[in-house]
Image (cartoon, rainbow, N blue to C red):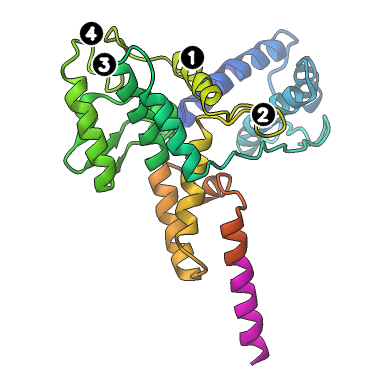
């Protein structure tokens, strides 16, 4: 019975656009655990016992909440399914790693270091310069960049296909970004490649994230950016954070402009909810100055 309920639950999630791979595997494990003990309905005690097998407190809470969401849907259909308390294995303390916000000079240094990669004259220097520059200029995810095909570069912009929740989007490009991308395309089309991937190695093969990250760490060393903050190296993903923050700085302290911008930024970044975009923002001196100016203007207006 639980197996049939789970199959329906997984189908509903995937119909809504979720890939639901890892959760599906874990929930199948829970259902096996429960059915082997004769359960036909979810019980709080069984859910807690299964979740408690995980090796870390964070993982135990994650497993419990996964079963809890499953139980909530089944309980709505049949009250015999019990819903375990969300804090039955303790309360989670969300730890957000503060993103590294690159300065414009640091991004220029990274791109110059990429342009100096060996072998000189091969596609490798311009490829890495274009790849990192595109992420910095558009805020796309590294996985989205590596998945791009030649046909995804269109006259209207960059087509990002089938990303999170099976969503696709079209990114308009600034004229300067488009110019750099077109320069790269000239070099890319001169290389014989096994597939139509936009970013390729000197051997004409698609790039893996592991390969790109290894080169990125070399660039951090060459630009002396490694270990600049409490032993934590800046990440490629921090270029996406930097794009979100720097674009928000352009709004100054115009509240209506900020409201419009956040909606547009959320769409441009490919987020399902605007709250996902807030996660990418980080206080910077420019933003704090703008907030202080807006607060002072509000106070003066109120006093008047």
Earlier sequence position, callout 3 versus callout 4: 3
Q: Residue at x 46, y 63 (%)?
A: 251
Q: Which residues are magenta?
A: 291-304
Q: Residue at x 56, y 58 (%)?
A: 286
Residue 194 - label: 4
Q: Nearer the viewer, mark 2 or mark 4?
A: 2
What secondary structure is found at the residue carrying circle 4? Answer: loop
Left or right position of 59 against 218: right
Earlier sequence position, callout 1 versus callout 2: 1
Q: Nearer the viewer, mark 3 or mark 4?
A: 3
Earlier sequence position, callout 4 versus callout 1: 4
Q: Are marks 2 and 3 in contact (CB under 8 Å)?
A: no
Asked whether residue 17 is in view, the answer is: no
- For the residues labelled 1 and 3, the Cα–Cα distance comes to 24 Å
Residue 238 sits above or below residue 128 on the image: below
Residue 210 - label: 1
Residue 292 located within the stretch drawn in magenta: yes
Residue identified by numbered label 3: 121
What secondary structure is found at the residue carrying circle 3? Answer: loop
Percent x, y of residue 293: 60, 72
Q: Are marks 2 and 4 in contact (CB under 8 Å)?
A: no
- For the residues labelled 2 and 4, the Cα–Cα distance comes to 37 Å
What secondary structure is found at the residue carrying circle 2? Answer: loop
Indicate the quadrant where residue 270 lies: top left
């Amino acid at each position: 019975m639980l197996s049939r309920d789970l199959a329906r639950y997984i189908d509903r999630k995937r119909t809504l656009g979720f890939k639901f791979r890892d959760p599906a595997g874990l929930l199948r494990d829970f259902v096996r655990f429960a059915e082997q003990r004769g359960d036909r309905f979810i019980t709080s005690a069984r859910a807690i016992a299964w979740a408690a097998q995980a090796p870390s407190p964070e993982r135990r809470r994650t497993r419990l909440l996964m079963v809890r969401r499953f139980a909530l849907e089944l309980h709505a259909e049949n009250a015999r399914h019990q819903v375990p308390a969300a804090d039955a294995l303790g309360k989670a303390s969300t730890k957000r790693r503060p993103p590294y916000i690159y300065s414009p000079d640091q991004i220029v240094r990274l791109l110059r270091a990429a342009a100096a990669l060996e072998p000189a004259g091969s596609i490798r220097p311009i490829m890495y310069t274009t790849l990192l520059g595109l992420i910095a200029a558009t805020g796309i995810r590294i996985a989205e960049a590596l998945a791009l095909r030649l046909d995804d570069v269109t006259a209207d912009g960059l087509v990002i296909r089938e990303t999170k929740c099976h969503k696709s989007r079209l990114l308009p490009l600034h004229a300067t970004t488009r110019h750099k991308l077109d320069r790269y395309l000239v070099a890319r089309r001169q290389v014989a490649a096994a597939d139509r991937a936009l970013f390729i190695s000197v051997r004409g093969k698609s790039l893996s994230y592991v390969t790109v990250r290894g080169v990125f760490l070399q660039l951090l060393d060459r630009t002396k950016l490694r270990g600049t903050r409490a032993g934590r190296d800046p990440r490629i993903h921090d270029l996406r954070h930097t794009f979100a923050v720097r674009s928000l700085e352009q709004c100054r302290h115009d509240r209506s402009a900020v409201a419009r911008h956040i909606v547009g930024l959320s769409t441009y970044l490919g987020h399902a909810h605007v709250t996902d975009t807030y996660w990418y923002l980080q206080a910077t001196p420019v933003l704090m100055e703008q907030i202080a100016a807006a607060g002072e203007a509000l106070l003066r207006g109120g006093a008047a």
